[in-house]
Image (cartoon, rainbow, N blue to C red):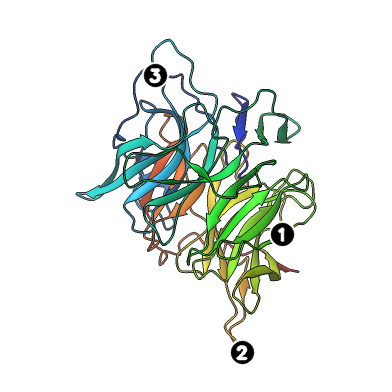
Amino acid sequence: MSLSCFTALSSLIIIACPVPTAHEPSHAGEAGSGALEVSFETAKATAGPLGRAVQLTTGKEFVKAGESYISPDGSKVIFQAVPVPPQGQDPDEHYGMYLGDLKHDHGTWTLENIRRISPEGSANTCGWFHPTDSNRVIFASTVTEPGKGEVPGYQRNSKKYRWAYPPRMRIVEARIDGPIPPPITLLEGDEDFYQAECSISPDGRHLLYTSLESGQGDIYIRDLQTGERHLVVGAPGYDGGPFFSPDGQRITYRSDRNKDNLLQIFVGELAFDEHGTMIGLDGEFQLTNNDHVNWAPFWHPDDARLVYATSEAGHDNYEVFEVQAVRGGGVGKPAQYGTGKRRVTQVSGFDGLPAFNPDGSLMIWTSQQGNDGSQLWIAPFDVAVTHGTEAGECPVAH
């Protein structure tokens, strides 16, 4: 689960990996393909690795859209969104899960053939493409309409943002190579408590997810070949938002283990048994150690850095930052965790939930920069651009 963005104009309840609420009123219409809108502010202000940004979804289609991931072949995007309702009707209370085709033509990008893949009325979040089968996706869903009166989880003192933990939120799987069938529960027998924030290891063998089985957020890994399940991060407080590194040897996640309503970014080195099952962590490294909310970490495909969202520029202006996460390479090549921090996005309003295409040349993220509510944006990402690098924070190893 990611953490919701604070806005001074509205309060919202977010299911699991949330996206800031749109500031604009709903418009009548139906979901379709995203119109192209280039942000002059982004082109003018970008001093880091991002190129010219393009808006993929708009307020004509969605009241809000966010948490998007690009397929392993680079051709599709999975994301959660609330569609614009017919005129006179209220928008859905919960996010649906959507799929779109990512097209590139004449130097720009569009999101076409957008279709809903989750059941109507259900609450959904945390979509992910299967890494070895392009026709399968997973996401977290209540499958049917969530129960009323769900107790909110995280709340800051101002109560401007919060999320809920539906007990019936479970990890499901769906095929996308034809008419979308009803999703099936991936972890049978584990449906009695909230499970979400799911992803699959690059080789397709292990499922990584967050569970409230213990009453707090803990991170588990299940071997999909053997059925073995292991607790990998169970620190006090909520641990969540985990992703495998590109080589499948590490995970990144965020933690509220200090219980101070602030989140910090961590990387854990995975431990394996003799059969190749992931059984826990060999070591843990803290990449941020500050008085800000840091969340939604995501690996760059080069396996040497990650991006994340932070309140460092203000709770009304979350921005995407990059930080180094380089493994040690033996004598003379020590690990570099938490160094080389730099700001990636440079525009007003919320920017967060970043992710990359397979070769790392594009970053997709959720942004409010277009004065169109929270929508999906995409831009070229150049790791060779180093302008704007800030002094790195001192890494904290455990």
In this figure, which residue is indicated by the disc labeled 2?
331
Q: Are marks 1 and 2 in contact (CB under 8 Å)?
A: no
Query: Which percent across, then down, holds residue 288?
Result: 67, 58
Q: Nearer the viewer, residue 234 or 46?
A: 234
In this figure, which residue is indicated by the disc labeled 3?
27
Residue located 25% across and 49% down the image: 104
Looking at the rendered structure, the number of numbered marks drawn on it comes to 3
Amino acid type, callout 1: Val
Above or below, 258 relative to 112: below
Earlier sequence position, callout 2 versus callout 3: 3
Amino acid type, callout 3: His
Furthest residue toward left: 106
* Left or right, residue 268 beside residue 111: right
Badge 3 marks a residue whose secondary structure is: loop
In this figure, which residue is indicated by the disc labeled 1?
233
Looking at the rendering, which quadrant does residue 14 occupy? top right
